[in-house]
């Protein structure tokens, strides 16, 4: 058995995609599998933390030994994460939150019409940024998927959202990120310092993520 270094700590993890319904039968979403977030939640549980896992629709069963909250939309994710984050020591946002939702959700199925249609979308709230504006002593961790200029963009994101660090990954590498069991990430801090981690299992990425977060939480506790 590994370390129990998160004993007595409260950890909130978000996972999976969100679904933004346009009408009762159609939605905007993305292919997030939830595997990265579930791995973080399971690793935190095994290290003694009290864990709340807030997840969008994924094909994974509820892990034992934690509170699991199933949501669909970004607004539902926001409600559940902000509530659980109240007395959290660490929040890890792995969820692939849809950037936009329908400006107006139709309550009846929209019939097909001839010709083009346009969708009116409105931005979803940035949950990690909201947590960052009222950070307190919580440690905040985000993920970012970039196709180019990853480190600079991730550092700016960490700054803007007031996150302690962001794990950057790329959608283009085979077997990593969306859907895969492995991940290859770069840890990026707001000051631009960064570390490339080797390609490894999502569980091992979770372990290293929690090692880094645990160091920061010990720092917060002793300052
Ligand atoms: O800005 P971007 O979507 O690339 O940021 C990714 C990070 O921010 C992830 O940790 C994601 O969970 C979080 N996020 C959020 N709310 C949003 C969009 C992203 O908390 N609306």
Image: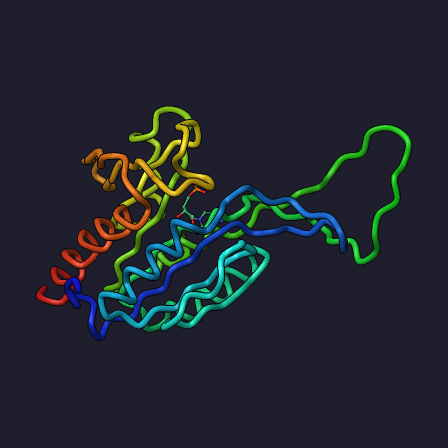
Give the farthest residue toward the right: 114
Q: Write the residue at 44% across / 54% down.
A: 15
Whether 181 is drawn above or below 175: the answer is below
Q: Write the residue at 32% across / 73% down.
A: 87
Q: Is residue 159 left or right of residue 144?
A: left
Q: Quadrant of the C terminus?
A: bottom left
Front residue of 52 and 129:
52
Q: Write the residue at 25% across / 40% down.
A: 187
Where in the figure is residue 7, as x and y percent of width and height? Answer: 20, 72
Q: Quadrant of the N terminus?
A: bottom left
The answer to which quarter of the image holds residue 219 is bottom left
Q: Is residue 94 left or right of residue 101?
A: left
Whether 205 is drawn above or below 169: the answer is below
Give the farthest residue toward the front: 1
Whether 116 is drawn above or below 168: the answer is above
Whether 60 is drawn above or below 5: the answer is above
Front residue of 62 and 87:
62
Q: Is residue 219 left or right of residue 102?
A: left
> Which color scheme does this rendered protein use?
rainbow
Front residue of 162 and 31:
31
Where in the figure is residue 2, as x and y percent of width and height? Answer: 16, 62
Q: Write the residue at 87% across / 28% down.
A: 115
Give the farthest residue toward the top: 148
The answer to which quarter of the image holds residue 198 is top left
The answer to which quarter of the image holds residue 82 is bottom left
Total number of numbered discs in the rendering: 0
Where in the figure is residue 16, as x and y percent of width and height? Answer: 49, 52
């Amino acid at each position: 058995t590994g370390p129990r270094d998160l004993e007595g700590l409260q950890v909130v993890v978000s996972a999976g995609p969100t679904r933004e319904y346009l009408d009762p039968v159609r939605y905007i979403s993305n292919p997030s599998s939830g595997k990265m977030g579930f791995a973080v939640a399971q690793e935190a549980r095994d290290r003694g933390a009290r864990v709340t896992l807030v997840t969008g629709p994924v094909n994974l069963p509820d892990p034992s030994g934690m509170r699991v909250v199933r949501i669909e939309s970004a607004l539902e994710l926001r409600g559940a994460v902000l509530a659980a984050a109240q007395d959290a020591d660490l929040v890890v946002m792995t969820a692939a939150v849809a950037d936009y939702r329908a400006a107006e959700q139709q309550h009846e199925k929209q019939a097909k019409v001839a010709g083009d249609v346009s969708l009116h979308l409105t931005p979803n709230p940035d949950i990690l940024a909201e947590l960052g504006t009222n950070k307190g002593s919580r440690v905040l961790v985000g993920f970012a998927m970039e196709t180019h200029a990853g480190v600079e963009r991730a550092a700016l994101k960490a700054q803007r959202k007031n996150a302690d660090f962001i794990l950057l990954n790329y959608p283009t590498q085979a077997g990593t990120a969306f859907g895969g069991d492995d991940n290859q990430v770069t840890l990026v801090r707001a000051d631009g310092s960064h570390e490339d981690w080797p390609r490894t299992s999502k569980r091992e990425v979770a372990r290293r993520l929690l090692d880094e977060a645990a160091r920061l939480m010990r720092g917060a506790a002793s300052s």
